[in-house]
Amino acid sequence: MNTQTILVFLLFAVALIYVARLIYKSLQVKKDGCGGNCKCGVDFSDIKPIKK
């Protein structure tokens, strides 16, 4: 193997690790009770339930 092939394989491995890390982080459960893309900082205390 020449140097160029080794560099291509190394770059591919680094990209694969990066993508795997992104997927792993997106699938992890948050420990603060929030699911991720929610608005946990919003105060819902003034909202009244709708009565039918």
Image: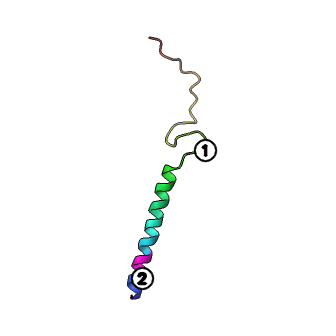
Q: Which residue is mark 2?
A: 6
Q: Residue at x 51, y 43 (%)?
A: 36
Residue 8 lies within the magenta run: yes
Magenta highlight range: 6-10
Q: Which residue is mark 1?
A: 31
Q: Amino acid at mark 2?
A: Ile
Question: Secondary structure beneath disc 2?
Answer: helix
**Dividing the image into 4 quarters, which one contains the N terminus?**
bottom left
Percent of width and height locating residue 3: 41, 87
User: Which residue is most to the bottom?
Assistant: 2
**Dividing the image into 4 quarters, which one contains the C terminus?**
top left
Marked residue nearer the N-terminal end (2 or 1)? 2
Looking at the picture, does residue 20 appear above or below residue 33? below
Q: Residue at x 61, y 42 (%)?
A: 32
Specify the label residue 45 is tagged with.
none
Percent of width and height locating residue 49: 51, 17
Residue 48 lies within the magenta run: no
Question: Secondary structure beneath disc 1?
Answer: loop
